[in-house]
Image: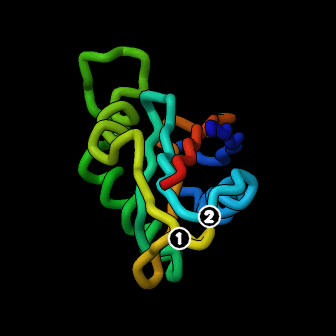
Amino acid sequence: MLFPIEISTHSRTELVDITEEIRKVIKKSGVHSGTCIIYVPHTTAAITINENYDPSVCEDIVTTLNRLVPHSVHYAHTEGNADAHIKAAIIGSSRTVFFEDGKILFGTWQGIFFCEFDGPRRRKVLVKVLKD
């Protein structure tokens, strides 16, 4: 089953916690145990799993990515968003999570984040739920 999620971002670069949306999709699917694939069909956005307890972790990720891949450097790609493409390539366009009894099998503090690198925009995340 494929479920789209709509996301509105508010900054050029930000991480949006979509953990609850993914939990809702799993519940809506009616599948109790299986695999959930989270995919971003955009070349300037990504998906990651990281700590969602302390918001400073997301701030550190954004700050470090912006320092490593700055927006204002001369790139061959001239649309003004080459840095966003590079950041998305580094982080990746999909993640896979497992769930049992309708619950995602996370480690302590883990959450799922949509990573915006060329916002603000309206974006789509595609979630595929597979039954065991």
Q: Label 1 belongs to which residue?
A: 100
Residue 41 on image: x %, y %: 50, 29
Q: Is residue 40 visible?
A: yes
Q: Label 2 belongs to which residue?
A: 32
Residue 7 on image: x %, y %: 68, 44
Q: Is residue 85 left or right of residue 76?
A: right
Residue 132 on image: x %, y %: 48, 55
In the rendered image, which quarter is residue 75 located in? Answer: top left
Q: Which mark is residue 54?
A: none
- Name the residue at 41% across, 50% down: 95
N-term-proximal mark, 1 vs 2? 2
Which of the two residues, 4 or 84, is positioned nearer the viewer here? 4
Number of numbered discs visible in the structure rendering: 2
Marks 1 and 2, how far apart in space? 6 Å
Circles 1 and 2 in contact, beta carbons < 8 Å: yes
Above or below: residue 122 compared with residue 15: above
